[in-house]
Amino acid sequence: MKSIQFPYSVALRLKPMPPVFYLLLVLMLAAPGPVRSQEEVITSYRHFREREYSTGYYEDYEVRPLKQAPVAIPGVRIGTFPYSPSAAEVRIRTRLADSHRGIKFYELQQCKDCHPRNALNNHTVRANITCRQCHGGEPIASINHYFSPMNPIRRHAYICSKCHQGANVSFASYVIHEPFPADVGTLEEFPVLFAAFWFMVAIAVGTFLVFLPHTALWGVRELLTKKKGGAGGS
Amino acid sequence: MDHKSRIRILRFSPVQRLFHILLVISFLVQSATGVGRMFIETGFGRLLCYIFGGYGMARVVHIYVGIFMILGFGVHAVYLMFKVDWRRFPGSLFSEDSIVPRPSDIKGFFSHMQWMFGRRSFPPFDRWGFWEKFDYWAVFWGMVIIGSTGLIMAFPVQSSRYIPGWFLNVAFWIHRIEAILAMGHVFIIHFFIAHLRRHNFPMDRAMFEGSVSIESARHERAAWIQRLEKEGRLRTLMVEDAHPIRRAVYYVVGYSAMFIGLFLLFGGLLNSPDITW
């Protein structure tokens, strides 16, 4: 009888994994977590209490203004209102429950009378979305008020997803009131946009600068030449 | 078929012409829907969108035709893989028959300019003029840029899972400027060179019929014809002119494309002060 040798294949032979495996492992660690479209994103608490059960007091995931918004525009000054491209150095009203508290003749005017630049956004001028469909009824909360639906931590859920099903926090970092990219001010408010704009314009202008004169000269030159080649088109 | 009637030389294969006509149609649809949406605040834009069923539908058409273009671009890339002469690989990319730019194209540009100022005779271009190479590669990279930003914006919620949402603002402007560049180039420069300059007037049928008249090629692409004659290949490339009815169709297609393009161009220019940029 063949004697069984001990330990019988107990020695676990760990085959070395292919390097790709470790690469994948590292990549997995670097990958972003899943985005939950309807959650507030301030802490890693995933399952905070449903709103219906809220006492009005939330845990630390709720409503405290962040140092930085969940998805920040690179190059934009870190501050309390990173999402406000229109320079907000002196904005003091940006954390009020009623952003228009105490403003005279507010009731008598339209939004665009006082906020003309804000009326120039694609949602308004093209898709006929009214200001209030996003900013809500009275009182209009300031953007960064703790409980404002516009607060970047919950804007995606309370505003955008009304129309854009499944909107996530990254989607909500789209700048609705986009500054005009050619303006110098945009360099501070949205540097990436400014750079991309002028880069593309440089390419376009460069192309036309070379080829428009070239084409025009060519046309003139051929007018002055006796035509060679087949009659009527080639 | 006697040789006398073979007065034209083949420049484009049927597959290449198919690519071109599909590109013509989809480019015009994308231009019309895109310009229509961009100018929706004006009557011009509303008219364009109306044709496609309104502002919302214009977006739908734009997205579907855009995806069609991206697929076509993919097919074209596969086609290129078959077209490259792999046996003489790296060298073949820079041969005279290749559309890849070479240093001599820069020289070609300057000798062409000298010719315009009467400093020299018309330069002997080979199979592809530098302006044709530029056209090709401009469309090539334009497809990459417009296609990628367009895909991002077509599915904004999904794409912002992988890229930050503020990039939608950036993508929008890249898409817009690149599209303006593409339309300006096609509607002004490409149309002028292919239709209106005297040598080609009323229209260069090469991309529709596949062939150009040999006299015309002898003048415009002297080096190419010379090369073919030396290699003894010229004979094999000679073809007859198309039937007059087919020729008429080519003219109708070419001129419709041109008029649509010019309508968009002038409509856009005239209305550009009236929109929110």
Image (cartoon, rainbow, N blue to C red):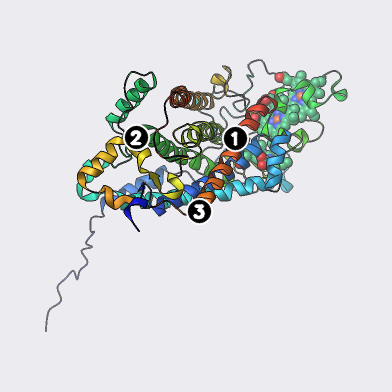
Residue in the image at 67% along x and 44% along y:
A161
Residue in the image at 49% along x and 31% along y:
B189
Same chain, labels 1 and 3: yes
Residue A133 in view? yes
Point out which mark residue A230 bears.
none
Foreground mark, 2 or 1, reads 2
Secondary structure of the residue carrying tag 3 is helix
Give the distance between the C-alpha atoms of the residues marked 1 and 3, in whole angstroms: 24 Å
Q: Residue furthest top?
A: A90
Q: Which residue is mark 1?
A: B262
| Residue type, mark 1 in image | Leu
| Residue type, mark 3 in image | Arg
| Residue B277 position within the rendered picture, expressed as x and y whole percent measured from the top left | 64, 27
User: Which of the pair A216/A206 is nearer the observer?
Assistant: A216
Left or right: where A216 falls relative to A18: right
Chain of the residue that carries numbered disc 1 in the rendered image: B
Q: How many marks?
A: 3
Task: Estimate how packed mark 1 is, as few (under 14), some (14 to 19) or many (20 or more) residues with alpha carbons within 10 Å.
Answer: some
| Residue type, mark 2 in image | His
Q: Which residue is mark 2?
A: B219
| Residue A165 position within the rendered picture, expressed as x and y whole percent measured from the top left | 65, 48
Secondary structure of the residue carrying tag 1 is helix
Q: Which residue is mark 3?
A: B246
Secondary structure of the residue carrying tag 2 is helix
